Amino acid sequence: MRRPRLRTVLIGTGAALALVAGGTVVYAAIASPINSSGVIHGCYYPANSVGSHKLVLQNVGTSCPSGTTAIKWNKKGPAGPQGPSGVVSMAQYQILGGFPAVTGAAWKFLGKPPAQDFTDSKTAAQVTGTIDLATTNGKKNSGFLGICYEPVGGSALTPVGFVFPEFTTPADSFFAQTVSGVVGNLTPGQYHVGLCATQQSANTANGHGNVTILMAETASGISSASPRLGAAPKLRPNR
């Protein structure tokens, strides 16, 4: 006597399971607490005597037990606002000691900043520069330090933030001064961004320094409230 051949066919989740035995076909639906729209079904049980709550999944199309509350939620929540894409690149450059004082009214870079690519209006650069400052003669000293940008091939720097260190130290006694700023909302292209100075006292000694540039793609460009500064205020000569 020949034995009937048995075949088992498995079909993906949410379909049916077909069992074929000697020509007989049996279908059994595969139950799931998640429907075709991605909605999850469950039953909420009241707290027990010690305050513990329980939530169990319930198959679609079935009823929750008496005394429980049927609840459902989406497997995928609503999309939130687009955030920053994150840091694209980081660059650093050094400033060698002995850079002469910037005594004029125009902003000038301290050191030679590398060119950075601003691919669109949402590209921004977070720039932080630190430099050692001193006086050459121990007399009162002042001047502006800032973060500036300039299009490659341009002729004038634009500051986006500055500090005004004013000090009196013994000659050649250096201290570190840090300034930072954000450059953004620019026409796409290549720009130099870095540490800059203007209206420094003639007795300023610019020592060693370093600048870090973090390039990033923002969600909508830098805030329109961010300062976009022009020339530094005019100062009276130090006495």
Image (spheres, helix red, strand yellow):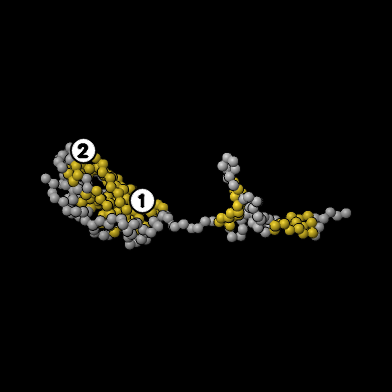
At x 24% / y 48%, what residue is drawn? 163
Corner quadrant of residue 25: bottom right
Quarter of the N terminus within the rendering: bottom right
Left or right: 31, with 78 as reference point = right
Corner quadrant of residue 70: bottom right
Q: Would residue 61 be visible to someone looking at this image?
A: yes
The residue to which callout 1 is attached is 214
Rounded to the nearest angstrom, the CA distance separating label 2 from label 1 is 31 Å
Left or right: 144, with 93 as reference point = left
Q: Earlier in the sequence, mark 2 or mark 1?
A: 2
Left or right: 12, with 201 as reference point = right
Left or right: 102, with 23 as reference point = left
Tell me the crowding category of disc 1: few under 14, some 14 to 19, or many 20 or more residues within 10 angstroms, Cα based. some
Q: Would residue 148 be visible to someone looking at this image?
A: no
At x 63% / y 54%, what residue is drawn? 33
Farthest residue to the left: give it.
239
At x 22% / y 43%, what residue is drawn? 133
From the viewer's side, name the closer residue of 75 and 3: 75
The residue to which callout 2 is attached is 173
Q: Is residue 136 above or below residue 110?
A: above
Of helix, strand and loop, which one carries label 2? Answer: loop
Of helix, strand and loop, which one carries label 1? Answer: strand
Residue 76 point in image, percent of width and height = 54, 56
Kind of residue sitting beneath label 2: Ser
Kind of residue sitting beneath label 1: Leu
Residue 150 point in image, percent of width and height = 28, 57
Quarter of the C terminus within the rendering: top left
From the viewer's side, name the closer residue of 83 and 90: 83
Residue 160 point in image, percent of width and height = 28, 54
| Callout 2–callout 1 Cβ contact below 8 Å | no
At x 38% / y 59%, what residue is drawn? 220
Farthest residue to the right: give it.
1
